[in-house]
């Protein structure tokens, strides 16, 4: 943290403008810097880059944000070194070999089938496919590849299950969407393998990943500082819920310092029983899903409804608002979900909205679910606004 701040307080215009003298304790210095949002970075894009940037040491990625203007993120090689090192250690923790074979199904950037080796990730072998023209052929290649791990969004793991029954990886690693209990159970049941989920952002990389023994989400504190803050940006004590704010200690070219992820969570006050040093993050709301509009014009956070429905055995759900007379929730019931479960889920959904807008659950086929332009599952489709 000292090395990071000692450098970027001089080289990054928006930070230099703060006029801070580094304190003896770098975390005191950090606490005096303002929280920054994605919108603020967009508004002064160049001001957030170091002036001594070396383009040959950088790689960029565009965030897939479900709303608004995408943001191009630039990382230096130092960032990737640490990201890869922790991914390797995680592979060891999960009992996977260095030369593991990983399948990335339905990757939106690629066409039929593509394999490559990544030396920086321990000579692992990736196989991925995107747009599927021949399901039988892709299913055959998946079986032949025999992945050690499936690495994908929860919704894509379920789609893979439907297309390639009987695939038996040792583990399913999920990311990119908030994993529901029903989704986790359905994936584990089908693949007969444990699900290990992680939470992260394009801006910071993996922020927290599941403990191999206890399932809690350990933060990557070796390379990130994670803070929880209130609506005014004041740090909250462990246990309290608030905005998740991260500082990447290794990206000196486009530093994300006290960056508000837009996600909501809490750092647990107790240690994980596994004995690992890193604190445990409890994710409350992984994504800002938007708001449901009631007939009188008031708005209710859609997560209020989603969280009620998450308690029922549903593999997948999507709230769709087309008008203000009725709300539809598309659902794929999990195995063992009864008609009574669906009735109780409907009651809970209506209660979540205080019976001010009728909610109807409808069984839907996979292809009826709308996806974001990046191919991510959406929990909410708002046809009133978009
Ligand atoms: Zn643990």
Image (cartoon, grey):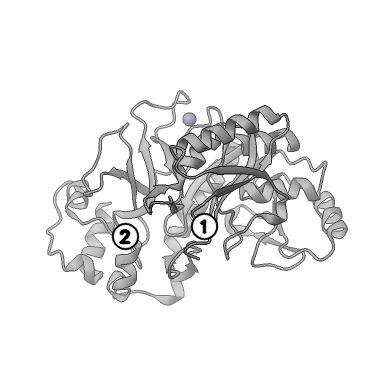
Q: Which residue is mark 1?
A: 323
**Given contact means CB atoms under 8 Å apart, are the residues at marks 1 and 2 in contact?**
no
Residue at left offset 80%, top offset 52%: 142
Q: Which mark is residue 150?
A: none
Callout 2: SS: loop
Which of labels 1 and 2 is toward the front? 1
Gap between marks 1 and 2 measured at Cα: 31 Å
Callout 1: SS: loop
Residue 209 appears in the figure? no
In front: 240, or 313? 313
Q: Position of residue 265 (x, y in %)?
A: 38, 40
Q: Position of residue 351 (x, y in %)?
A: 47, 34
In front: 369, or 26? 369
Binning the other alpha carbons within 10 Å of mark 2 as few (below 14), some (14 to 19) or many (20 upward) gives some
**Vertical placement of residue 179 versus 258, above or below:** above
Q: Quadrant of residue 125?
A: bottom right
In front: 168, or 312? 312
Of the two numbered discs 1 and 2 on the same chain, state the one appearing first in sequence: 2
**Vertical placement of residue 213 versus 228, above or below:** above
Residue 329 appears in the figure? yes
Q: Residue furthest top?
A: 273
Label 1, ligand 1: CB separation under 8 Å: no
Q: Position of residue 152 (x, y in %)?
A: 63, 51
Q: Quick check: 129 left or right of 261?
A: right
Residue at left offset 67%, top offset 39%: 171
Residue at left offset 37%, top offset 49%: 224
Q: Position of residue 14 (x, y in %)?
A: 22, 68
In front: 189, or 254? 189
Q: Which residue is mark 2?
A: 37
């Amino acid at each position: 943290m000292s090395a990071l701040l000692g450098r970027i307080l001089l080289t990054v215009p928006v930070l230099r403008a703060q006029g801070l003298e580094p304190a003896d304790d770098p975390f005191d210095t950090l606490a005096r810097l303002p929280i920054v949002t994605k919108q603020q970075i967009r508004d002064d894009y160049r001001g957030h880059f170091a002036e001594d940037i070396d383009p040959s040491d950088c790689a960029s990625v565009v965030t897939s944000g479900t709303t608004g203007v995408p943001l191009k993120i630039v990382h230096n090689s130092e960032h990737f070194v640490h990201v890869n090192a922790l991914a390797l250690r995680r592979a060891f923790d999960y009992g996977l070999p260095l030369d593991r074979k990983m399948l990335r199904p339905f990757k939106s950037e690629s066409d039929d089938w593509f394999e490559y080796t990544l030396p920086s990730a321990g000579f692992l072998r990736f196989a991925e496919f995107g747009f599927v023209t021949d399901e039988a052929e892709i299913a055959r290649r998946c079986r032949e590849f025999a992945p050690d791990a499936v690495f994908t969004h929860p919704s894509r793991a379920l789609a893979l299950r439907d297309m390639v029954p009987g695939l038996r990886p040792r583990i399913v690693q999920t990311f990119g969407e908030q994993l529901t209990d029903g989704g986790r159970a359905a994936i584990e049941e089908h693949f007969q393998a444990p699900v290990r989920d992680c939470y992260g952002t394009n801006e910071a990389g993996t922020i927290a990943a599941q403990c191999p023994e206890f399932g809690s989400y350990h933060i990557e504190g070796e390379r990130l500082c994670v803070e929880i803050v209130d609506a005014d940006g004041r740090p909250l004590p462990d246990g309290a819920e608030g905005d998740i704010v991260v500082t990447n200690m290794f990206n000196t070219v486009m530093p994300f310092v006290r960056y508000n992820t837009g996600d909501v969570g809490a750092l647990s006050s107790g240690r994980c029983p596994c004995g690992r040093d890193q604190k445990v993050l409890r994710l409350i709301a992984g994504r800002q899903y938007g708001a449901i509009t009631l007939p009188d014009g008031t708005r209710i956070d859609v997560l209020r409804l989603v969280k009620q429905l998450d308690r029922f055995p549903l593999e997948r759900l999507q709230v769709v608002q087309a008008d203000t007379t009725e709300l539809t929730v598309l659902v794929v019931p999990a195995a063992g979900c009864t008609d009574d479960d669906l009735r109780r889920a409907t009651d809970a959904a209506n209660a979540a909205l205080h019976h001010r807008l009728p909610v109807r659950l409808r069984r839907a086929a996979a292809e009826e679910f709308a996806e974001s332009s990046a191919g991510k599952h959406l929990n909410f489709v708002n046809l009133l606004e978009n």
